Image: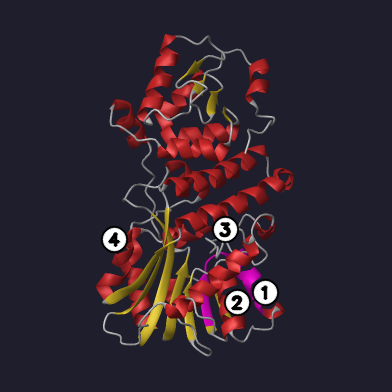
Amino acid sequence: MESHGTPYDLESLETQTARPRVGAFDRWIARKLLAARGNPPVPIRLWDGSEVGPGAETAVGRLRIADRSTLLRLVAQGELGFGDAYSEGKIEIDGDLVQTLTALFNAAEPKGWLTRLMTRRNRPRAHTHTLGGSRESIHHHYDLGNDFYALWLDAAMVYTCAYFPTPTVSLEEAQEAKLEHVCRKIRLRKGERVLEAGCGWGALALYMARRHGARVTAFNISREQIAYAREQAERQGIGSLVEFVEDDYHNAHGRYDAFVSVGMLEHVGPENYEALGRVIDRSLHADGRGLIHSIGRPQSVPMNRWIERRIFPGSYCPTLSEMARVLEPWNLGVLDIENLRLHYAKTLEHWLERFENNADQVRARFDERFVRTWRLYLAGSIAAFLSGSFQLFQLVFARAGSHAVPWTREYLYTQS
């Protein structure tokens, strides 16, 4: 995706403001910033047109910096400063946005005084995952308006990683394939009771009821999403099979044949993993089984500060060992692990393309800064999955001593 000309474009800024001349100090800071990122093939173009970094023959893209204050902001605020400066139009990226961001993610990060400074300043704010705090975080992201998300999600409003049987299927086909993939992994049968923690706009619960005849109780604390899901259940004539509860999943009661959580663990917070496991333990029958689907990390690192502040407050993406902390205290054993990292990159590519095709409508509803913020979020997420900074884990589990487990994986691929 090429850099977009906007009211925030650097060329316009150059004609409107007078800025100090570039000096040796500015070029030194630019070189140190590149070194702190492992000297990626992404030169920095300063406000007088001069460049620091690799030559054009090896460059993947170019960062254009509007002024000295923006340059120093990158030192003082790190990822948060970069994201905010891009949103404001103080940083432009020449070349393909995703490729440039991927190159920045791929570059090694040697230790040094500037790296330590930027890492310290990048630590996310403390976030307490109380019900009130979680409601505020969910409202910040998910209650932007169903019509906004409908511009770029699939027809079923699935806002999690799709499953692409082949790379060329449509987003709608891939999202339905994901819903079926989840149902097969938990070996869902007609009439079974399912507890879903964090149901989004209800696509998985609706699919389980409509396609498999399951009875689903789905929890969510987003008012807009719950209202949409209830409306869809009535419209599809399956309201008697699906109950959408506007409440925290901790308040779930009763016994179920299966537990599912798709795209919620990122918002739970590691301090609450044991409590989530307690809900699963008290909810599942002796031969119950479950699935947790979450963005993860290969190593335990803090969330990108800009993402945590501007996009997903309180978010954290766990490692596999951290995800296991949900299950281990309750003697729940992992049956299967699948990593769909590249499937999420492909999903995000579809979302970004649709977002760009509808950018004018988004701009009219919000403003240019909002468009640039979400463009960076979607493109940066693609880069994170392509580079391996983000993973996508699906864990299937059951009670450690259960004998009601599949002998092979044939059940995943044999048509019923």
Real-space Cα separation, disc 3 to disc 4, in angstroms: 30 Å
Name the secondary structure under disc 1: helix
Mark earlier in primary sequence (1, 2): 2
Q: Are circles 3 and 2 on residues that touch, CB within 8 Å? A: no
The image position of residue 217, as x and y in percent, is 52, 80
The image position of residue 335, as x and y in percent, is 34, 74
Real-space Cα separation, disc 3 to disc 2, in angstroms: 25 Å
Q: Are circles 2 and 4 on residues that touch, CB within 8 Å? A: no
Q: Are circles 4 and 1 on residues that touch, CB within 8 Å? A: no
Q: Nearer the viewer, mark 1 or mark 2?
A: 2
The image position of residue 216, as x and y in percent, is 53, 81
Name the secondary structure under disc 4: helix
For the point 68% across and 74% down, the residue is: 231
Q: What's under tag 2, amino acid-wise?
A: Leu
Mark earlier in primary sequence (4, 1): 1
The residue tagged 3 is 167
Q: Which residues are magenta?
A: 216-233
Q: Nearer the viewer, mark 1 or mark 3?
A: 3
Q: What's under tag 4, amino acid-wise?
A: Ser
For the point 56% across and 64% down, the residue is: 222
Real-space Cα separation, disc 1 to disc 2, in angstroms: 8 Å
| Residue 281 colored in magenta in the image | no
Disc sitting over residue 206 in the figure: 2
Mark earlier in primary sequence (1, 3): 3
Sort mark 4 into few (<14), some (14-19) or many (20+) by Cα contacts within 10 Å: few
Q: Are circles 3 and 4 on residues that touch, CB within 8 Å? A: no
Q: What's under tag 1, amino acid-wise?
A: Gln
The residue tagged 1 is 232
